[in-house]
């Protein structure tokens, strides 16, 4: 039987012994909510860190998100140099993977009724580390009810699936303001003869979550082009937003910021941002400049 494309696949991390019943109950709720659960089935007692990391990654990569349940005990210890618990080891493998894959999510659940219970020293260090390193694609929850936790997870993941459904591998991701649509389409038409182009017209009054989509599409893009003609004020603010959202100077996808020089007000609109090439050019020169930048990336 083929799987429903809307099925949410969840990697459920290991838990300490006192949290097993909570994990079992959560598993039943996840299944009833139509989700597919992925566990790691392996012997962890005597295993090399690299081998274990790869085994965990193999399962995490199958999932749309991971769930990590926190309790007051540190849990099963892996016999490695740091004497790490399996649940902590799995969390950091998932976290490192998620840093490179913005379309994945990490959910951390620390039930409210456990918060005041005394903690193992190692578990306290782990929980503090988790709390202090929450990133944009992590969700930390204290809901006492597993039903509410699952409903929140489901709502977030279904929203994300809708946002990323059109993401695809592309050479050029070309973004423009709707007010510059006609000129942008002329450039895109010429560039499409030499490269695969994905376009996005920004409607400024739209409630759409453009930044999430852009960040996701950037992971599948060789070159991002942000074009403007009459919308320079919007563009200079927008490129900074995109730069911040997609990793800044460490982003793997360079940005080409192109303004139409034939619009007089654009003459001094060049910007200085690391990993962003800013140019004011005549429209007829833009397809060639885009090709030059793309060829440099491919080579």
Image (spheres, grey):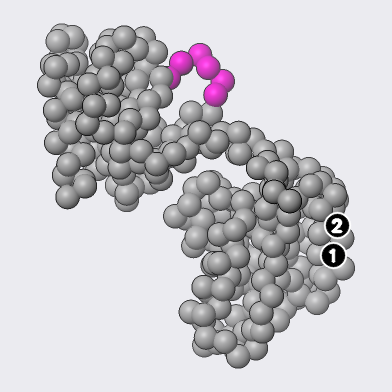
State if disc 2 and disc 1 touch (CB < 8 Å): yes
Q: Residue furthest front?
A: 1
**Disc ID at residue 24:** 1
The residue under the point 41% across, 24% down is: 200
Specify start and end residues of the magenta stretch as a single range. 202-208
Which numbered circle lies on residue 28?
A: 2
Q: Position of residue 148 (x, y in %)?
A: 82, 45
SS for callout 2: helix
Query: Measured from the top left, where is residue 11 in percent x and y?
Result: 67, 60
Q: Is residue 231 visible?
A: no
Q: Position of residue 63 (x, y in %)?
A: 62, 56
Indicate the position of residue 286 as horizontal and vertical percent values.
17, 23
Q: Characterize the magenta stretch by its predominant secondary structure.
A: loop
Magenta region includes residue 205: yes
Q: Is residue 30 magenta?
A: no
Mark 1 residue crowding within 10 angstroms, few (<14) / some (14–19) / many (20+) = few
Question: Residue shown at 54%/67% (left/top)?
Answer: 57
């Amino acid at each position: 039987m083929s799987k429903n494309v809307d099925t949410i696949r969840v990697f459920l991390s290991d838990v300490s012994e006192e949290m097993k019943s909570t994990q079992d109950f959560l598993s039943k709720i996840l299944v009833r909510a139509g989700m597919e659960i992925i566990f790691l089935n392996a012997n962890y007692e005597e295993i090399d860190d690299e081998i274990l990391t790869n085994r965990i990654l193999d399962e995490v990569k199958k999932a749309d998100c991971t769930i990590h349940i926190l309790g007051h005990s540190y849990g099963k210890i892996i016999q490695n140099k740091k004497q790490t618990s399996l649940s902590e080891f799995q969390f950091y493998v998932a976290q490192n993977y998620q840093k490179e894959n913005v379309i994945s999510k990490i959910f951390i659940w620390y039930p409210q009724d456990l918060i005041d219970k005394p903690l193992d020293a190692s578990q306290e260090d782990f929980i503090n580390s988790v709390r202090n390193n929450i990133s944009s694609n992590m969700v930390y929850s204290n809901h006492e009810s597993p039903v509410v936790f699952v409903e929140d997870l489901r709502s977030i993941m279904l929203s994300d699936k809708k946002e990323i459904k059109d993401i695809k591998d592309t050479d050029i991701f070309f973004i423009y303001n709707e007010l510059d649509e006609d000129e942008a389409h002329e450039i895109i038409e010429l560039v499409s003869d030499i490269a695969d182009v994905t376009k996005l017209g920004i409607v400024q009054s739209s409630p759409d979550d453009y930044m999430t989509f852009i960040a996701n599409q950037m992971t599948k893009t060789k070159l991002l082009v942000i074009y403007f003609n009459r919308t320079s004020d919007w563009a200079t603010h927008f490129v900074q937003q995109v730069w911040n959202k997609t990793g800044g100077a460490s982003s793997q996808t360079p940005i080409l910021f192109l303004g139409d020089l034939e619009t007089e007000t654009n003459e001094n609109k060049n910007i200085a941002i690391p990993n962003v090439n800013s140019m004011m050019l005549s429209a007829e020169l833009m397809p060639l400049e885009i090709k030059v930048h793309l060829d440099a990336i491919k080579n």
